[in-house]
Image (tube, grey):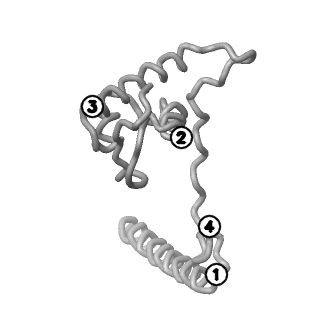
Amino acid sequence: MPNLDAVISNRIFSFLADLDLLLKESALAAVRDALRGTGSVARATVNEKPRSPKKAPSKRPKSKPGGTVSASSNKASAAAEKFLAYVRANPGERGEIIANTLGVHANDFRKTLNSWLASGVLKKRGAKRATRYWAGDRSK
């Protein structure tokens, strides 16, 4: 029997050469399919828009039936009163600065603020983040 080590070595090299050829053919076929657009790889088209994540449900409490006053509306009223007192002491300040100073969010008392603006308790100049507030002619 010829040298057993030489036979095993030849078979291993033959196997590796065949495997190398198969891998190259497979890679070329995958590239060819990808360029033609027939490959099984999932991809987005140029015009496809990314999906937006689902919005989390609102954490704001719903109003209670029967017109009862909730604790959150009392909190909003207290925050609005603090806002008005701050505006009287610091006229012309931006709403964002006032809310940050008081440690509240302006949306917590937006309805009260709008009603005071409509009734003349407060005056404002500017829009959006540049809005500045002054005490109005009518007192609360």
- Mark 4 or mark 2, which is nearer the start of the sequence? 4
Instruction: Inspect the image, locate mark 1, and give the three-letter code of the amino acid beneath it.
Output: Gly
Q: Is residue 59 above or below residue 72?
A: below
Can you give x and y, in whole percent of width and height, for residue 115 in the image?
54, 35
Q: Which type of secondary structure does the marked residue at label 4 adopt?
A: loop
- Mark 3 or mark 2, which is nearer the start of the sequence? 3
Q: Which type of secondary structure does the marked residue at label 2 adopt?
A: helix
Q: Which type of secondary structure does the marked residue at label 3 adopt?
A: helix
Q: Which residue is mark 4?
A: 42
What is the quadrant of the C terminus in the image?
top left
Instruction: Inspect the image, locate mark 3, and give the three-letter code of the amino acid beneath it.
Output: Thr
Instruction: Assess whether mark 3 and mark 4 are in contact (beta carbons under 8 angstroms).
Output: no
Q: Using a 10 Å C-alpha cutoff, classify the residue at mark 3 as few (fewer than 14 neighbours), some (14 to 19) or many (20 or more).
A: few
Can you give x and y, in whole percent of width and height, for residue 104 in the image?
38, 29
Instruction: Assess whether mark 2 and mark 1 are in contact (beta carbons under 8 angstroms).
Output: no
Say which of 67 and 3 sits in front. 67
Can you give x and y, in whole percent of width and height, for residue 106 in the image?
43, 36
Gap between marks 3 and 1 measured at Cα: 58 Å
Q: Which residue is mark 3?
A: 101
Q: Residue at x 60, y 58 (%)?
A: 51
Residue 5's mark? Answer: none
Instruction: Give the image quarter of residue 67.
Output: top right
Gap between marks 2 and 3 measured at Cα: 24 Å
- Mark 1 or mark 3, which is nearer the start of the sequence? 1
Q: Which residue is mark 2?
A: 118
Say which of 36 and 20 sits in front. 36
Instruction: Inspect the image, locate mark 4, and give the three-letter code of the amino acid beneath it.
Output: Ala
